[in-house]
Image (cartoon, rainbow, N blue to C red):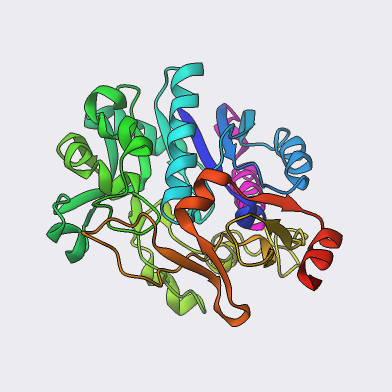
Amino acid sequence: MIVGVTVCHKDINQFWRWMKWTSTMRSYHTPLGYDHTLYVMANQRIQPEIDDIMEVCSGYGLWKKVRFKRCETEDERGWPASPTHLFINLLEWVEKETADDLLFCEPDTTPLSPDWIDLLQSEFEEGGKPFMGVEVRTMDDGIKMGFNDFHMSGVGIYGKDWRNAAPALADVLEASCEGALFPTGHAWDLFAGHQTVPNMHRTQKIQHTWRPKFVSKLSLPIVKPETILFHQTKDQALMKLWDEVHYGGKIFGEGSDLIQPIKIAPSFYHTEVASKPFKIAQGEYLPWKKVGPSIGGVQAGVLRVIDPANAIFLDFEATQKKGIRKITAEEFEVLTRK
């Protein structure tokens, strides 16, 4: 089984912590061996420091081999289209190179057992289904629009026969945004829910909890006793508490952070269909926002605003056709003064 992770430019520090956590935790249990392969699919805007991280991580205890690839195409429309784009590219990359099952994680997952991969793989094989994960209820708006009442949350196992078992996964990137639940496009787990749910083994070992707060050891009961892979935590609070309880604080040691965070510098962009050049601070996605009505549910041609405070507007569809050009800070200053 292959373990796969997708990472974008704004996930760089979270991914770095994930890599260090999974490998350091495993190193306390050397008899388990280091026999797993990790595939990492990153977007094109990922910081250059990722190359140093991957070089270091290739020597970490958990991973026998680490494969890294920058996605050949880019989709920076934001959630959920951008994560979907990276995930499908990862899925097809693993399919092409290995024809193996994929245990998909995101940087906001937290493995809680040193043998988490082995335990999940064993249950998947015993379950005998093409998919394994957590079944979650689809939001009411999605059900009204015709999506399945339930879907498999994205973090989980996608068997090697995924293309036959859920062909919708292969179609999601080309699907029209008309009828999409979100303005930027489709979420793959929701889009393919009608095919993954009937073909999934439901596991208790993966827990999906929306935006929990881990503030002290009193918060740990949020994690169910059977959970070995927790999703989602956007910070390292669960890691730090778990380390204190189960490893005596050895993983974090004296530090308050597992890593030396990488500073995410702002990026500057220009396009013919923007009212002015714009800056994306801290590596965030373009914060698209609908400011005009859609017609019959179709988003095409609707004007969206990137920065209301500075009155920077972008025509969404025109931008997708003409593209966004990255510029230097000096060019940004010159263009802004015009």
Report the residue at 36% width, 59% height from top.
183
Q: Hey, which quadrant is residue 273 in on the image?
A: bottom right
Instruction: Kindly tell me whether residue 251 is visible in this rendering.
Output: yes
- Quarter holding the C terminus is bottom right
Which span is picked out in magenta? 13-35
Instruction: Kindly tell me whether residue 203 is visible in this rendering.
Output: no
Report the residue at 48% width, 25% height from top.
94
Q: How many marks?
A: 0
Q: Quick check: 239 above or below 73?
A: below
Point out the residue furthest to the bottom here. 309
Q: Is residue 206 left or right of residue 93?
A: left
Q: Is residue 23 magenta?
A: yes
Point out the residue furthest to the front here. 338
Report the residue at 24% width, 31% height from top.
166
Q: Position of residue 137 (x, y in %)?
A: 20, 58
- Quarter holding the N terminus is top left
Q: Quick check: 92 above or below 51?
A: above
Q: Position of residue 172 (x, y in %)?
A: 33, 38
Q: Position of residue 10 (x, y in %)?
A: 62, 57
Q: Position of residue 242 (x, y in %)?
A: 53, 63
Q: Is residue 63 magenta?
A: no
Q: Is residue 13 left or right of residue 119?
A: right
Q: Observer-nearest residue: 7 or 286? A: 286
Q: Observer-nearest residue: 181 or 99? A: 181
Report the residue at 31% width, 46% height from top.
189
**Magenta span: chief secondary structure:** helix
